[in-house]
Image (tube, helix red, strand yellow):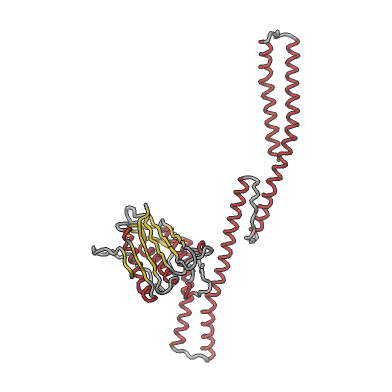
Amino acid sequence: MVALLAVLVASIVTAAVVALLVGPPIFHEHLIQAGHAADSPELAHIEEAYRDSSLTSLGIALVVALGCASVVAWYLSRRLQAPLGALTRAAREVSRGHYDRRVAVTGASRELDTLAEAFNTMAERLEQVEDTRRQLLSDLAHEMRTPVATVRAYSEGLQDGVVDWDENVATVLLDQSDRLGRLAEDLDDVSRAEEGRIPLDLRPCRVGDLVWAGADAARAAYQLKGVNLVVDVERASGVSVDVDPQRFGQITANLLGNALRHTPAGGTVSVTAFRDEAEAAIRVTDNGDGISPEQLPHVFERFYRGDTARDRAQGGSGIGLTISKALADALGGSLTATSPGPGEGATFTVTLPTASDGPGTRHVTPAAASQDAPTPEAPPGPRHRTPTPPRPQEML
C-alpha cells in the first residue's frame, strides 16, 4: 500500500514540476501572439492567475488521487494479504512435517494462483516421498524380520542342544543369509543408481541382436512356466543404437521377468522392436494381470509393489523397474508403462536414440540389479550372428 501511494505522489509531483517549467512559457507565448504587450501589467496578472490555478488544480488532484489510491491500495493489499497469509501458514506446517496441507486457489491474481498451484504440487510430492519412506521402512522391517528370526531360532536351538547340526540346518541358515544378502545388494543398487556411480561402456549394437539376446536368456523360464514369448524385430532391421550391452541386457531381463511374473500359464508376452523417427523402440506387451490407473503412476517408484499381498519371493523387492528406468534415462532414452486396466495386460516401451559415430564411455545414473523375479541373469551382451536367414518373428 505504501509503495502504491509513493508511486502516486511521485507521479503528481513530477507532473507539477513539468507543468511549472513548460506551461508558463508556452502560455506567455500564446498571449503575445494574441496581441498583448510584453510589458503589460494585464499580461503579468493573467500569467499569475494561470500559475495559481494550475497549482491549485494539481493540489486538489493530489488530495483526491491520494484518497482514491488509498482505498484501492487498501482493497488490493487486503485481497493479496489473505492468500499470502494462507500460503505462509501452510509453508510453516509443511516445514514441520505436515505434508497434507494445501492452499486454495482464490483467483486473487494469476501470479498468486500459479504460486498456490506450485506449492500444492510440491506438498503433494513431499507427501508421496514421505509415504514411500514409511512404506520402505515397513518393507525393510518385514523383509528382515523373517530371516533374522529364523537364524536366531536355529542359533538358539543349536546353542541349547535342541537342534543338531546337519545338512538341512546348514541349508536353512545359508538360504536366510542369502536372502539378507540380496536385500543388502538391492539397497546398494538403489543408492548407486541415485548417486550415479556406475559407468556405461557405450558401443553401437544392432537392436535385433539386443532383443534376441534378452529373449534367448529368458527362454528357459518362459518354457518352464508355459508362457509364450513372441519376438518381432523385422521393423528394426538395420537399426543400431549406442548402448552398454550388459546394462541394456538388465533392462530386457527386468521387463521380461516382470511380464513373466504377471502372466499366467498359457498367456503370451510379445517383444516388438521398430524404428520411431530418430529413435529405436522396444515394446514388451503381455496379456496378464494388468495395472490399475491408481498403480500406474507408481510402477517406477523404488520398492513399490502393486500387490502388497505378495512376498519377496513372489512379488520381488520392487526396484527392478526403478533401475531399468534409470538405465534407460542414462542411455539418453526413456522407459514408459501403459495398461488398459486390471486383467488386460500391460505394455512397457523402451526408446533409445539411434547410433551415432563411435563408441564411448560415460558415468551416469543407472543401476545394476535385475528385476527381482526368478528369471535367468542378464546376458553379457548382444550376440552378433553370422549371416544366416533372419528371424524377424518367432515364438519361443
Residue at the image point whose x is 57% and y is 71% from the top: 138
Nearer to the camera, 372 or 351: 351
Quadrant (top left, top right, bottom left, bottom right) of the N terminus = top right
x 68%, y 39%: residue = 3
Q: Nearer the viewer, residue 206 or 262?
A: 262
Left or right of 70? Residue 109 is left
343 shown above or below 83: below
Left or right side of 291 for 235: left
Q: Position of residue 177 (x, y in %)?
A: 47, 79
Percent position of residue 47, x then y: 73, 16
Name the image quarter holding the C terminus. bottom left
The residue at 55%/75% (across/down) is 142
Percent coordinates x, y for residue 215 in the rendering: 35, 68
User: In the displayed structure, would residue 288 be above or below residue 235?
Assistant: below
Residue 240, quarter of picture: bottom left
Of residues 328 and 108, which is closer to you in this image? Answer: 108
Q: Residue at x 58, y 65 (%)?
A: 131
* Number of residue marks: 0
User: In the image shown, does 362 or 27 lie closer to the viewer?
Assistant: 27
Place of residue 248 in the rendered image (x, y in percent of width and height, measured from the top left): 38, 63
Q: Is residue 119 left or right of residue 238?
A: right
